Image: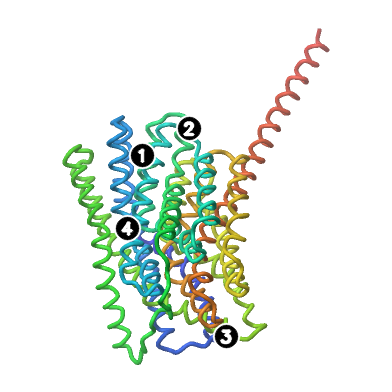
Amino acid sequence: MQNLIKSKLSESFSSIIPIALIVAALAVTLTPMEPGIFLLFVFGVVCLIFGLSLFTMGAEMSMQTIGSKIGAYLAKSNKIWLIALVSFLIGIFVTISEPDLQILAKQVADLSGNADMMLILTLTISVGVGIFLVIGMLRILFKISLSLLLIIFYIITFGLCVFFVSPDFWALAFDSGGVTTGPMTVPFIMAIGAGVSSMRSGEEGHDDAFGLVSLCSVGPILSVMILGICFSIEGGSYVGAPIEQIIDTQDLTVRYLHGIADHAKEIAIALLPIIVFALLFQLLTRAFTARKMLRIGIGLLYTFVGLVIFLTGANEGFLPVGQELGRALASLGDIWKWVLLPIGMLLGYFIVNAEPAVYVLNKQVEQITAGAISASTMRLALSVGVSAALGLSMLRVLTGINVLWILVPGYIIALGLTFFVPKFFVGIAFDSGGVASGAMMSAFVLPLATGACLALGESVMTQAFGCVAFVALTPIISIQVCGLIYNYKSRQAVSRFISEQEYFIDYTTEKEEVRS
């Protein structure tokens, strides 16, 4: 256990420190900060390192174990109605409590000037996830092509955009698809998918282990599009996150203690449905031994404490600094403001590795592919993709480019690549898009874009929202490019093997002819 804790701390440290160094370098050069704000950030860095370590350890011990067992049980039951009902309820309950969604919904409610919009948006997105989790489970059971479903649903999505939905909802809808697949939903959904697919033998089960997260990301996009037909967002003005003055260490301590109390309540509510569901499942099936249940309980405790610490650091330390950085960089002048592009790309390269759910995805990919796709390869592909995404996001903030000018060609490329890469790469790639756009995107990247928009006098609704959508898109392309390389190398290896065999056969034949 001690070695495991050290390993997790080392992973978290190497993920968070590069971001801290970039922000620190900016704070002493281009964007000087008040000491109080910078101290908030320093404490946030410490919280993220310890919180991420505890969360990843706890998720492996609890969430993945529960989800995998439930998935396998549902597949064994062969009862379509039971699979559909349980999947729908899990999708709704887990999504309602997703911390990333709460951050986004609060910002939309502030912007619209309608407090009810937070509840409306949360319920709309949760129902969307529930419906598409059902679709994803049925896809695995009935062996329906993931590529076909994604093409159909994205055609419907862009059709709604062009003909029915207000442009104010375009960026918000795609951002909703990204933030809902965060640290609460991803471990559970991926484990359920792995459990169901494990009941199918052969390569098809291997291929279908991925894809649930990607479909659950489409659900919120479509549901928010439909919401956009019925509602309009107007009358409010979003001014960003309030930044309280930090005068001394007592102010700092009070702020973080308040943050811990608030997030402890949120995460307790978030975990409650999962705990109740797991207990009911255990009472009905006796699937776990007493020792296993104790391990799951300890894992859930680690998950709870880790998420509380992580989200406190992200929201109290990273959010205000992200907003201040965006404001300061965009205010440097007509020429220097373009420094937002390379800085955004640099932050994007490192920030994705600080996402809690990314660790879960990378580990499961490495396990299910038996090491053919290593965690380090996944990290590199995700980093390159998110770096490109934040570069595009900052370009859009500075120029006012329409979000569809990037999303439409981007998804055409992403969906087109599905015909040329191995099937399991398609699921991994589209799942990665949802996983990469998590807590750090809501708490640091979105405030960065918001701060820049406020400094430039741009619309937050149309220009700042959308950056999470880009983060969800670009890893899909970068990981499928890895799939093309994997395919090419596999074919080369087969060709070399065949050539060597043919050479050996020819050589043996010639030798026998000489002897005769």
The crowd level at tag 3 (other Cα within 10 Å; few <14, some 14-19, many 20+) is some
The crowd level at tag 1 (other Cα within 10 Å; few <14, some 14-19, many 20+) is many
User: Foreground mark, 2 or 4?
Assistant: 4
Whichever of labels 2 and 3 marks the residue nearer the N terminus, that label is 2
Tell which residue pokes out farthest to the top in this image: 516
Q: CA distance from mark 3 to mark 4?
A: 38 Å
Say what amino acid the circle numbered 3 marks.
Ser
| 434 over 329 or under it: above or below | above
Tell which residue pokes out farthest to the left in this image: 283
Q: Is residue 4 visible?
A: no
Q: In the structure shown, which secondary structural element does the residue marked by tag 3 occupy?
A: loop
Residue 331: mark in rendering: 3
Q: Marks 4 and 2: in contact by CB < 8 Å?
A: no
| 334 over 498 or under it: above or below | below
Kindly identify which residue carries mark 2. Answer: 204
Residue 195: mark in rendering: 1
Residue 123: mark in rendering: 4
Q: In the structure shown, which secondary structural element does the residue marked by tag 1 occupy?
A: helix
Q: Is residue 249 visible?
A: yes
